[in-house]
Structures are given as structure tokens and as C-alpha cells.
Amino acid sequence: MDLLELRNEIDKVDEELIPLLIKRLEISEQVAAYKAKRNMPVLNEKREQEILDDVKAKCGDKGEYIKTIFSSAMDASRALQHKIIGGGEELRSIIEDSFIDGELYSDGFIACQGAEGAYSGETSGILFPDNPVKYFKAFEDVFEAVDKGEAKFGIIPVENSTAGSVHESYDLIMKYRFYVVGAYDLKIEHCLCAKPDTKYEDIVDVYSHPQALSQCNNFIKNFDFVGINYSNTAAAAKYVAESDKKHIGAICSESAAKKYGLKVYRKSIQNAAVNKTRFIVISKRLLISENANKISLIFTVPHETGKLYRILGRFSMAGLNLTKLESRPIEDGNFSYYFYTDILGNVRDEETLDLICALSEELPHYEFLGNFYEAD
């Protein structure tokens, strides 16, 4: 047979499969009704595994291939059952009670890390132009301020387009179980600054946040500077301005340099011309605006072959685009991991909500971090 004839044969087989697959889904609908009436869970992992093992055993050297096809069919059937039953009732109720009209609003100050002139403060001015900012020394202090009700919202960085994720922020989100209710992608332009009476050729040590040092590591290496970690770019600028040392500089924003009376010696020293940092708005209360366009989740999957692949397939099945997938270790000594996922979508869409809620019942650990509007 030539290729065209072989493809025609495949088409014939597919035509035979379609009514069988439709029949399988129709029976799954009946199964859903049966389970709903008896308050039974949709997922029966033991039965699914028994079926997959049996399929593999029956199909010889093609067992793994056929097993993959069957697992996809099971995932589709389960998604349909969740849609009929309305799985994840607890999370569904929390989400539906969190819908708000209009934009985020706070009548108090916004908690940020660092000092005046920090990029987080600049972000706060864009998102909450009418709210004052209160600065805290550490990221965790921002979480504490929100946790104690001193501030309704906090703003922290979570990711840079050059240097990657700010892992401390993600770890604190898990520790405090806060929600993400907003985000902004801020363009970052770093400058090398020092006191006006400091000579450029005398600068040896450069202070800044580790992320900023990473974003400017080419510049630092090319000019033989020594990067020294500091809590925040603006705080580093303040330290340099108040120090008696004559050989130090700071990597910070031009506005921070102006704030603390520093001279800008070099502008736009970051590695990439387009350099953005994603800042998120954290809250103890879940709030979802109508224009929300991004969903953030944290989950774990069992240490079993293909489990993560099948979960990711569920997002594809629902027509959702993943923009981020990153693992972080669980501190249990077993090399287990949380998966942080960002998805484009809005839970006001019925199919999206069905999936988000269904997964809350199926995964061993699952956190819905929020559905929010991300601006840039």
C-alpha cells in the first residue's frame, strides 16, 4: 500500500471508533447520574488502574500506546461526569461568593517590601493611585501586615522576565495560604548609582536585591564589580546614600536614586532591553473581578508514571493555555514537589470552573490561589 491508501485505512478505523467513543461517553453520563444519586466520588483510582493494567497486558508490545489512549478516554469521561455532578462543591461555593463588580478597592495603605523608591511601591502607585504605601523590611513582614489586618493588600514580586521566579514569594504564599487578587508586569530599568562625590572608577562593591544583581550580571562581570545582596533595590540606594564608604554603589531605579540624592552613573544596565517584573497583589480574602484573565494554582500529583501528563492534558481538553509550570520542593525530606501553574482564563466560564473544581477533588493537595486581572 502507498501512503494515501494507508491513511484511508486509518480514516476507516477512525470512522468505526467515533460511534463507540460517543457510546462510551453516553454510558459515562449514566454513571454520573448513578454516582450523584448515591453521593459517590467521580474518581475511582483503583478501578482505573486495574483497567489500564488489563489493557496493557492484552495488547502485547503495543500495550503502552493503547494504555495512553485509554487513559485519555478515562480523563474525558471523568471530566464529563464532573460537569454533570458539579464536582468540587466546596471550592465552587468559595469562588462564586468571591465575584466582585468593578476594580479592587482598599481604603487603607498598601503593604510593600523595601523603602521609598522601590519598584513594588511604583507598582502600588499604578494599581492603587489613591492609597498610601507602607514599607516593610522583609517579604514576610508584608504577609504579616496583611495577615493581621493592618493592610488589606500587599504587593510582592514573583517573577522576572530575565532572572526567573522569586521563590521566597511562592513559599510565603504557601505558608500563609493567601490569595492572588491582582497582578502587574512592571518594566524594570536598572541604574548604577553612587554618592555624587564618589568617582566611578573607585566603585568596587555594588549593593542590590539578588534578583536585580542577577538581571544585571553581565554589566557587573564586564566591569569587575562585586555584587552584594541587599534586601531591596531602594533600600540598597538608601544604604549607599547614608554610608561613609567611598567605594560602593547601588543598582536601583532612577527614581530611587533621585529620592536618596545619588548620582546616576549608568542607565539601563540590565542584561535584556525588555526587562519586566511581575508583581502580584496578595489578600486574605478571595476577590475575582469580571475582567480576570489569569488563574493561579498549586497542586501535587502522586509519584506515578504519566500522572502530571494526564493533569496537563485536562487543561488542554478544556481549551486552557498554561503560561507557567514550575516545581518547588515540599519540606518533607522525600523529594516531593508542589507544582505552581498559571493559566489564561476566567472561572466565570462554566467549563473552566468545572475543571478547576473537579481537580480539587482528584488531586492529593490542591490550592486555588486566585483568578485575577494581570495588567502590563
Image: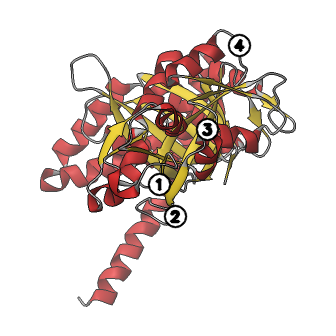
- Mark 3 closeness class: few <14, some 14–19, many ≥20 residues within 10 Å: many
Separation of residues labelled 2 and 1 (CA atoms): 8 Å
Single out the residue that lies furthest toward the left: 61
Residue 328's place in the image compared with 218, above or below, is: above
Looking at the rendered structure, the kind of residue marked 2 is Val
CB under 8 Å between discs 3 and 4 = no
Residue receiving disc 4? 150
Separation of residues labelled 3 and 1 (CA atoms): 16 Å
**Of pointers 3 and 1, the one earlier in the residue sequence:** 3
CB under 8 Å between discs 2 and 3 = no
Residue receiving disc 3? 120
* Mark linked to residue 161: 1
Q: Position of residue 105 (x, y in %)?
A: 82, 30
* Mark linked to residue 109: none
* Mark linked to residue 274: 2
Separation of residues labelled 2 and 3 (CA atoms): 18 Å
Q: Nearer the viewer, mark 2 or mark 1?
A: 2
Looking at the rendered structure, the kind of residue marked 4 is Glu
